[in-house]
Image (cartoon, rainbow, N blue to C red):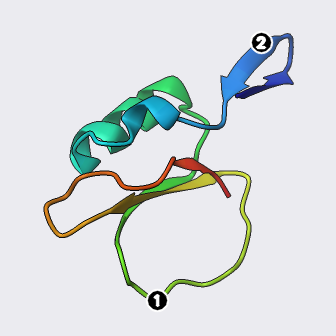
Amino acid sequence: MATTCDDHEVKTRWPELVGKLGDTAKETIEKENPGLREVVIVLEGSAIDEAYFTDRVRVWVDETNVVIRVPKVG
């Protein structure tokens, strides 16, 4: 999924990264959406705030650093 911004599309979801390594996913997201303030790798079960930010992506990983949820802006 993407949104339009100044006549170009900005990627906001990365379903293709589920099953990939967290570090690889983070690098891909930063490359495909350089306007993000923060791309954070989060271990499954970690406590997080519920705040929604349009310039942040959480990359949820399991104990082996494999992405387990679709990374998306929020």
| Label 2 secondary element | strand
Tell me which label, 2 or 1, sits earlier in the chain. Answer: 2
Q: Pick the quarter of the image with the C terminus.
A: bottom right
The answer to whether 70 appears left or right of 45 in the picture is right
Q: Residue at x 29, y 42 (%)?
A: 19
Q: Which residue is mark 1?
A: 47
User: In the rendered view, would you say 15 is above or below 4?
Assistant: below
- Residue 49 percent coordinates (x, y): 61, 84
Residue extending furthest toward the bottom: 47
- Residue 31 percent coordinates (x, y): 43, 27
The answer to whether 66 appears left or right of 46 in the picture is left
Q: Pick the quarter of the image with the N terminus.
A: top right
Local packing at callout 1 (Cα closer than 10 Å; few below 14, some 14-19, many 20+) is: few
| Label 1 secondary element | loop
User: In the rendered view, would you say 58 is above or below 36?
Assistant: below
- Residue 16 percent coordinates (x, y): 44, 29
Local packing at callout 2 (Cα closer than 10 Å; few below 14, some 14-19, many 20+) is: few
Q: CA distance from mark 2 to mark 1?
A: 35 Å
Q: Residue at x 50, y 25 (%)?
A: 32
- Residue 60 percent coordinates (x, y): 40, 61
In front: label 2 or label 1: 1
The answer to whether 73 appears left or right of 63 in the picture is right
Q: Residue at x 66, y 37 (%)?
A: 12
* Residue 61 image label: none
Q: Amino acid at mark 2?
A: His
User: In the rendered view, would you say 27 is above or below 10?
Assistant: below
Q: Residue at x 71, y 76 (%)?
A: 51
Q: Which residue is mark 2?
A: 8
Q: Amino acid at mark 1?
A: Ala
